[in-house]
Amino acid sequence: MPESSTFARRIIDWFEHNRRDLPWRRTYTPYQVWISEMMLQQTQMDRAVPYFERFVARFPDVHALAAANEEEVLKLWEGLGYYSRARNIARAARIVAESGGEFPRSRAELTALPGIGPYTAGAILSIAYNEDEPAVDANVERVYARVFDIDAPMAEREAKARVRELAAQLLPTGESRIYNQAVMELGALVCTPRAPRCDTCPVSEDCEARRLGIVAQRPVPGRKKDIVPLEVATGVLVRDGRLFVQKRPEGQVWAGLWEFPGGTVEAGETPQQAVVREFDEETGFTVSVREPIAIVRHGYTRFRVTLHCFLLDMADASAEPHLTAATEYRWATPRQLDELAFPAGHRKLMDLMRGDIRFTHLFRI
């Protein structure tokens, strides 16, 4: 085990010369640190930064966010995925605003807020308040797994406990803000998952994995999750230049987002048959397929989706929907659709339609 103060100082010194200029590092306000940490869960840094800047421009503080409607929050989150994070942010903002607007500065109060777990609480306490709290993300786990040769998958309880213990032991008193960020930055820029730059690492002489020649084997890989293919059909129904969309209910994937109706292609069905059936089940509309629009492929979590998209005709143009899989519906112009939040696959579908000569007339509305 390296001498803790020397180890920490080398990483901090490296960070002082190599840190990225990130917007929340300019102020370290608790609100901005919280928003950045929520966005960075399951999101790469280069994607999160522009989302963060747009979000805080619209909602500069917790009171502005608390006053917002969920629709606008989800729209600004569109494309980041894991939309429960956005809904948790909105709920937590209302709780904080109703309690006076001062962001909590204790672990118990922070973890009582929706969406804030042990890591996020530690990050807020250390980065925003400089409290002597460790913050362990995937980057930190990778650095410590290599430096200290932790020979178990990080998903295992013992390995996680060992990393938390090391993070607490190595944390220099009064410097948690800088040290925690330094270790995260080291993992992001130098001690990367593939092709780590060991020759530029400030603690390479302490790295047991490097000494043993097993850097590529640390962290120990866990069991890979099985990829689940999904065949899904969806339909675009147009009436008087407006497109039919519905809003997904609470408790389901993509809750609160808008979509074109559709669903999974069942065994023995064609995608065309599936979209007709799904429209009948979800809206009560009797529809037929006019023509295919496109096939959109996208992934989320462990699913790989093939989305078959069709332009539809409706038997009775005056019929009203009877929703069974949504909380509300709209007949919206393409311009109005731009104001709503959609899952990635449906947003890709709209982008494809905009570039398709068959739909030029529709998207001029």
Image (cartoon, rainbow, N blue to C red):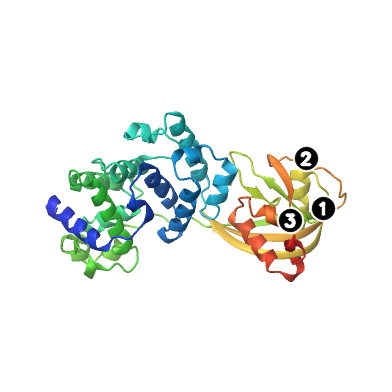
Residue 322 numbered tag? 2
Q: Residue at x 36, y 57 (%)?
A: 22
* Residue labelled with disc 3: 235
Q: Nearer the viewer, residue 82 or 61?
A: 61
Q: Nearer the viewer, residue 284 or 69?
A: 69
In the image: residue 106, left or right of residue 259: left
Q: How many marks?
A: 3
Whether residue 161 is situated above or below residue 102 in the rendered picture: below
In the image: residue 136, left or right of residue 86: left
In the image: residue 364, left or right of residue 116: right
Q: Identify the amino acid type marked 1.
A: Val
Residue 130 place in picture, x, y as percent: 26, 43
Mark 2: which secondary structure?
A: loop
Q: Residue at x 73, y 59 (%)?
A: 271
Query: Which quarter of the figure has residue 128?
Result: top left
Q: Is residue 230 visible?
A: no
How packed mark 2 is, by other alpha carbons closer than 10 Å (few <14, some 14-19, many 20 or more), is: some
Q: Residue at x 19, y 48 (%)?
A: 170
Q: Identify the amino acid type marked 2.
A: His
**N-term-proximal mark, 2 vs 1:** 1
Circles 3, 1 touching at the beta carbon (< 8 Å): yes
Residue 279 numbered tag? none
Q: Residue at x 57, y 46 (%)?
A: 72
* Residue labelled with disc 1: 287
Q: Identify the amino acid type marked 3.
A: Gly
Query: Which quarter of the figure has residue 121?
Result: top left
Looking at the image, the residue that sits furthest to the top is 99
Mark 1: which secondary structure?
A: strand
Residue 203 place in picture, x, y as percent: 19, 61
**N-term-proximal mark, 2 vs 3:** 3
